[in-house]
Image (cartoon, grey):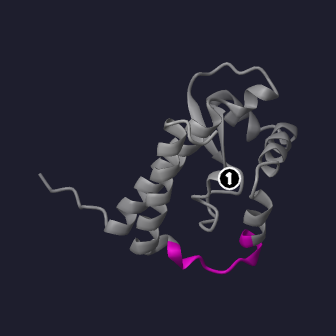
Amino acid sequence: MKKKAKKPRNKQLQTKAENLWKAVCLARDKGCVGRRFRSCNSDILQVHHVIGRGNRRSFLEIINGVTLCKSCHFFLHHNDIFRMTIEDYAREQNGFERLKDEVRQGGAFLEWSRIGWLEHKIEILEEILKGLEEGIYE
């Protein structure tokens, strides 16, 4: 039996950072944001990237994440009006316009593969998650 190849360190950190990002968004939103606009019928929660996952510059920004139940997430990808409603909700959050401006700058985002940057981002996400769990942040 072959040994499974170990992921490179930066890939491990990217996975850890994404999982922390999801945990922060879930803790912050305290359930499906879509329930503010429609009836939900799923207990499975997912985090949606308002600015697409392919954009690494905004990938781990918590203001770019919105918690949705599985049915609302599906509905969002198949209903333009609901998608725009959720995007409007995200725009109302502090800092979202700044993030959009950074994304517009474009260019390669090289930090995504740098170990030092990922470790720093993980520290920040861990601190925010701890603050949310302790009730320091609302």
The residue shown at (60%, 42%) is 137
**Residue 93: % across, % down:** 77, 49
Give the image location of residue 99, x and y in percent.
Answer: 73, 64
Q: Residue furthest front?
A: 136
Residue 34 seen in the figure: yes
> Residue 78, percent across and down?
77, 38
Residue situated furthest left in the rendering: 1
Point out the image quarter for the C terminus.
Answer: top right
**Magenta segment range?**
102-111
Q: Please identify the quarter of the rendering in which residue 104 is found.
A: bottom right
Residue shown at 62% from the left, 62% from the top: 54
The secondary structure that most of the magenta stretch takes on is: helix
Residue type indicated by callout 1: Ile
Depth check: 64 or 78 in front? 64
Which residue occupies 31% across, 67% down?
A: 8
Question: Quick check: 92 left or right of 133?
Answer: right
| Residue 61, position as x, y percentages in the image | 62, 58
* Image vertical order of residue 131 relative to residue 108, above or below: above
- The residue that disc 1 covers is 63
* Residue 18 visible to an observer of this rendering: no
Looking at the image, residue 83 sits to the left or right of residue 23; the answer is right
How many numbered dots are placed on residues in this image?
Answer: 1
